[in-house]
Image: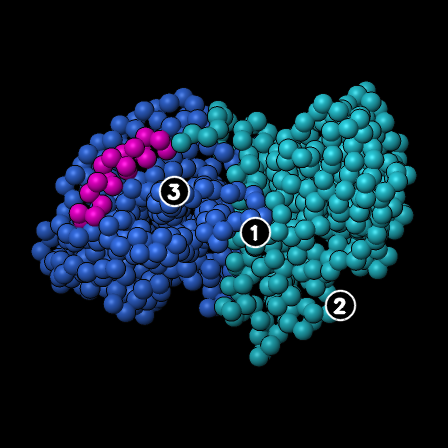
Amino acid sequence: MIHPLLPNQLQKTQETMRMAAEFILRPISRKYDKAEHEPPVEMEQLNQAAAAQKESTVGDDSVKSMDLKGRNLWAVISLEQMCWGDVGLFLARPGTGLGNAAIMAVGNPDQKSQWGKRWASMAITEPAAGSDSKNISTTAVLDGDEWVINGEKIYVTDGDRCDCVVVWATLNKALGKTAIRSFIVEKGTPGFSVARLEKKLGIRASDTATLIFDNCRIPRENLLGGKEEVETDIDAAKKSFGGAMQTFDNTRPMVAGMAIGLGQAALDMTKALLAEEGYEDSYGTSMGQQTAIQYELEMLEAELEAARLLVYKSAWMMDNKMPNSKEASMGKAKAGRIGNKISLKCVEICSMQGFSEDHLLEKFSRDSKILDIFEGTQQIQQLIVARQVLGKSSAELK
Amino acid sequence: MQDYKTEQPFDITMSEDQQMTWDMLMKFAETEMRPNARDTEALGRPEKALMEKMQALELISLIIPEEYDGMGLEQDAVSQALALEALAYGDLSLAMSLSVPLFTAKIISEHGSEEQKQTFLKPYCSQSLFHVALGMNNASAMGNPLNSSVLVEEDSAELILNGTKAGIAYASEASSFLIAATNSSGETNLYFVDHESEGLDIIAKEYMGLKGLPLSDITFSNCKIKTSQKLGGHNYSMNFQQLLDSSRIGMSALALGVCQAVLDYVVPYTNERVAFDEPISNRQSVAFLVADMAIEIEALRLMVHKAAALKDLGADFHRQASLTYRFAAHHGMKIGTDGVQLLGGHGFTHEHPVELWYRNLRAIGIFEGGAGV
């Protein structure tokens, strides 16, 4: 039955997460925007709140009746609310990083039990390889019972504070994407060091590290999914890289959810500021009746609602084990650009108050930019959607 | 922050019934409506044989209660939105030749007095579609959509109408009009006006789009009607905002069908059209326009379904309906103009349907009361 509405239970989750965001994240939002690179110690509180909420929600019968307990839709909704509080702080919460998603998606049972509860970041991007992750140069060579990793990774979220890193490396660069594997490297392994932390436009609460691997030796069993040798069978090889890329189908709805939370935060704050000067919503009236601000905000709200539904759909598809690559990219494309557009427009609408560090609107508008970049840029999402809609290969539509 | 209550899980799959109706209407849209879109425009209305086929779908008698000779199968708003999308996938003018009387019948069924239902609902079940013409569109641009450009004086034993309504479908066929008018307290209601009444002037109009749907303006000059001609009876007062919101979900569902038609047309076209030795869709500047179309269409579909689902729940759907129609107006027109753009000069000519969809999509965001859920 077509019913794109959230059941009561999930709406309660929204409320709880929103409270946590409002009372735990918001009060320290500006503090860690200013104190870049300082670990936000208050975030442990949020983890505890989230754990309690998850236990009570996922254990609930009404949610159980949904396929796979609606785990992904639950996660998107939770993320959305937390990022209504603060995206940077959410990314900086200790315990889970993108690497954890990869371990849960492609790890074997032993790896899941050994590493599943450790804080794992994800290292893919290199100075010379961003969106074209198949072009990475970090190498992994099997030497006896150890892999030897060499290379440089940049923009690793949680790269400094995590317990371990999921590192993408090639077994043989000449063989292209078929030779790419991911490995789990524990913090403190000799040859593995954090070179520096970036200073950024936004999400300053979250650490973004450059990692160096210099003859870093890790156990053979730390190869995450995939085979130790490069497949010669082309189909098997394609599947192997495709498997790695599939992690994105799972994580894109989450990042898109973050953009929606941020967009909502900007709209809410804008309306609150404007209300002090007499602003009221005017849904459904004519252009002739609305002020430019009312018109603009109604349109932005419509766009946000549209993005939200796309993202919920892509998460719901995951919960129901439907292939969701196109939908995940649709949601990420829409949410990424709209989150950015809303937050920038809200600064403009609120004029000097928007531009001022007295309020968080200017911060939202800096934080939002990364959400249209990481986990696949706007343009990458459009490429993925376009290829699927037009039925094109990556060779045809570059 | 909870603004509606439901125990139902999030879901976006059609029920079996919805799927069956959908398949049937989509086939009808593709085989009977789409091929006749141009001829319908040229004629200014559906050809008789086609209109009979559309009538044979029995979409209207379906929702009319049994005591007025209908089948009495009440349709939920989501199912109605699906039906509207499918019909508009064929052609918007043709779809509205059904959706306008369907909406009119629904309004009378929900708000009419017993006598009005007897008089006006029964004919729908015996081959009549256009005996009541609905007047919702205002002649003025700046006004509040909740206020009609026709005013009604209610303080005497009779009612007196003054002003002009625009874009009334099948006005010359109708024996009665159902006209939105605002009284001196600012309340807007609907009023039945006989075609034969004195003080009304019907003028056929041409518009840039919806040319397959005969549209007229009606001007009322001291047109007198009986107090019992108010929809629901002389003491009745309707929630006009809700009517407008229902109409806006309906219009958005129609827009969705047209947008999907555009996408399904430009995909094979841009894949086949070769320039500089390869299909134009191999280039990002073309492919990304198509990708964005697909994204906004899927988003619009979810917006329409959510608004309709909220209505079915009995929750407040004013905000959602408003946002949905705003979204449909903005992105519908963007898709319409990109559809022509992607075909270049070919898109500008009558050789392809994209210029027709472009013109029709301009009605979205403007037209009120062209469909409802």
Amino acid at circle 1: Met
Nearest the eye: A85 or A258: A85
- Residue B68 in the magenta stretch? The answer is no
Q: Is residue A198 above or below residue B324?
A: below
Query: Residue B138: percent from the left, percent from the top?
Result: 70, 47
Kindly report the distance in space between the C-alpha atoms of the residues bearing marks 3 and 1.
20 Å
Q: Element at badge 2?
A: loop
**Distance in Å between CA atoms under marks 2 and 3:** 52 Å
> Which is the main secondary structure of the residues drawn in magenta?
helix
- Quarter of the figure with the N terminus of chain A: top right
Horizontal relation, residue A373 to residue B276: left or right: left
Residue B183 quadrant: top right
Q: Which residue is mark 3?
A: A275
Mark seen at residue B351: 2
Residue stretch rendered in magenta on the structure: A14-32
Image hue for chain A: blue
Would residue B79 be visible to someone looking at this image? Answer: no
Marks 2/1: CA–CA distance: 35 Å
